[in-house]
Image (cartoon, grey):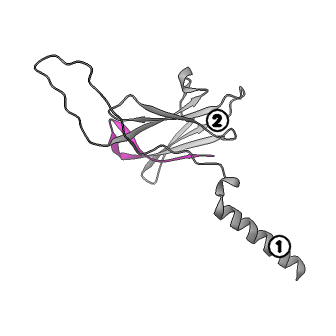
Amino acid sequence: MGKRYILSFFLGVTLVVILINPSLCFSENASCPKTIAVNQELLRVDKPWESIINDAPVQLMSVTIFEGHPKQRAVLIPDKEIKKNKRRISTWRLTSKTRKTYWLGCSYDRTNVMLVRPLEPNTSVCQVTYDPYVTISGHLSVVEIKCE
């Protein structure tokens, strides 16, 4: 009975740790904000034109994976693209021998703003799931981003 008690105790403690802070046991899933707020300004317009502000939310349009900082523009293409359960899934295998950091880029419709962030150093694969029936500015709508 002593060994079972000790095993149960350690399993219980492990479960509590996972529930309190799952990032200790699993890679952080990367994600992009679904919408962002931007302040765009027209610098000049010729008569008779005038500008108005469109107050529709600026939505996530596309996702990019970079090898190295995005300023270097080393965009990676997916290693595999499949259709599954009425969704499209793009997969990137991140196995660089150069030990460069991989970055996630999030682009938004109706703006030239891209949010970027480095992925965790131990990230080896990223999958982006799209809804092929919904588009945003001509791009398939991003449903989920999973990087492990």
Quarter of the image where one finds residue 108:
top left
Q: Nearer the viewer, mark 2 or mark 1?
A: 1
Quarter of the image where one finds residue 98:
top right
Query: Residue 31's spot in the image, x, y percent?
Result: 51, 45
Quarter of the image where one finds residue 45:
top left
Q: Is residue 73 visible?
A: no
Q: For the residue labelled by badge 2, is the local secondary structure a helix, a strand or a loop?
A: loop
- Which residue lies under the disc numbered 2? 94
The range drawn in magenta is 131-148
Q: Nearer the viewer, residue 37 or 104?
A: 37
Q: Nearer the viewer, residue 113 or 124?
A: 113
Name the residue type under label 2: Leu
Query: Residue 137's spot in the image, x, y percent?
Result: 32, 36
- Which residue lies under the disc numbered 1? 7
- Horizontal arrangement in the rendering, residue 78 relative to residue 45 (left or right): right
Q: Earlier in the sequence, mark 2 or mark 1?
A: 1
Q: CA distance from mark 2 to mark 1?
A: 37 Å
Query: Residue 106's spot in the image, x, y percent?
Result: 47, 36
Residue 143's place in the image compared with 47, above or below, is below
